[in-house]
Amino acid sequence: MVQKKDSPFVNARVLHSRVEYVCEMIKDGIIQKYWKPGDRINENEISDYLKVSRLTVREALSKLEESKIIERKHWKGYQLRAFNKEEIDSILELRSLLEMFVFRKFIELVTPQIIEDLIACIDEADLSLNNNDLINFRKADFSFHRKINHISKNFLVEDYLTGLYFIIDIIRFHYCDLTYEDIAKKSIIQHREIINFLKEGDNRNALIAVENHHTTFREYIHNRLETEI
């Protein structure tokens, strides 16, 4: 009996999994402010700490560089990217444009079950905020947006927005006040308002509510930047 050979892509899948793991660990370190904008990210340190090869770390750093989260400087290696006010404003504007595009597609496809799933995300975010669990709040808030993006069925925009959300989290945590409960509470209220309009079949006011949601967030970030940068 001929023994079936292992797939030639097994090692590639394992490497991909390790690279994703290292990416997520680096992202956690960024959010926890282990690295600040402009700080060098040491490949050897990550390799030793996570017990992975330097090749895997380089693959992860290269992936994060493609996402514009970090950058590579000549003779200095990788470092956490620093954003200026103009770049931050462009990021927020791009997020608003893409989410409005996605939401217009979303309202054509939304179902009562999807609305219930979104309500569950809002409830989880609300509970997490009341428990002062900002990490879980971030996850629930991200889940809310990810479900809307996914239902729109534009997967290129969905992938781009996923990367953009993490950059926006860097802006929140590194350039603004870490404890952003006020904007989080407003976000939950506005998310509920959007869902209520959808439940009533009022798509026009749902779109207006999304625009107001973006405006509130941009104004909050701009006000914080005036004092932080």
Image: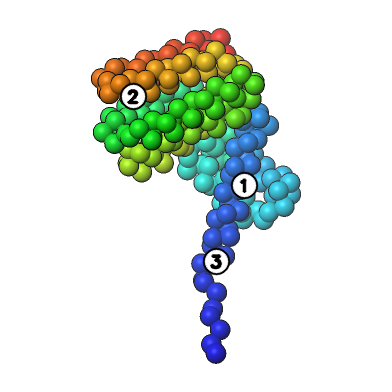
| Quarter residue 103 falls in | top left
Q: Of discs 2 and 3, which sits in the foreground?
A: 2
Q: Earlier in the sequence, mark 2 or mark 3?
A: 3
> What kind of residue is marked 1?
Val
Please rate how many residues cluster around mark 1, counting C-alpha atoms within 10 Å: few if below 14, some from 14 to 19, many from 20: many
Residue 29 placement, left or right of 218: right
Residue 78 at x, y percent in the picture: 59, 40
Instruction: Determine whether the residue tagged by mark 2 lies in a helix, strand or loop.
Output: helix
Residue 58 visible at all: no
In the image, 10 versus 132, the foreground residue is: 132
Vertical position of residue 80 compared to residue 195: above or below: below
Vertical position of residue 54 compared to residue 115: above or below: below
> What kind of residue is marked 2?
Lys
Residue 19 at x, y percent in the picture: 58, 51
Quarter of the image for the N terminus: give it: bottom right
Q: In the drawing, what numbered circle is on residue 199?
A: 2
Please rate how many residues cluster around mark 2, counting C-alpha atoms within 10 Å: few if below 14, some from 14 to 19, many from 20: some
Residue assigned mark 1:
22
Alpha-carbon distance for marks 2 and 1?
Answer: 41 Å
Residue 92 placement, left or right of 203: right
Instruction: Determine whether the residue tagged by mark 1 lies in a helix, strand or loop.
Output: helix
Please rate how many residues cluster around mark 3, counting C-alpha atoms within 10 Å: few if below 14, some from 14 to 19, many from 20: few
| Quarter residue 144 falls in | top left
Are the residues tagged 2 and 1 within 8 Å (C-beta)? no
Alpha-carbon distance for marks 2 and 3?
Answer: 46 Å
> What kind of residue is marked 3?
Val
Residue 225 at x, y percent in the picture: 52, 14
Residue 59 at x, y percent in the picture: 56, 51
In the image, 121 versus 15, the foreground residue is: 121
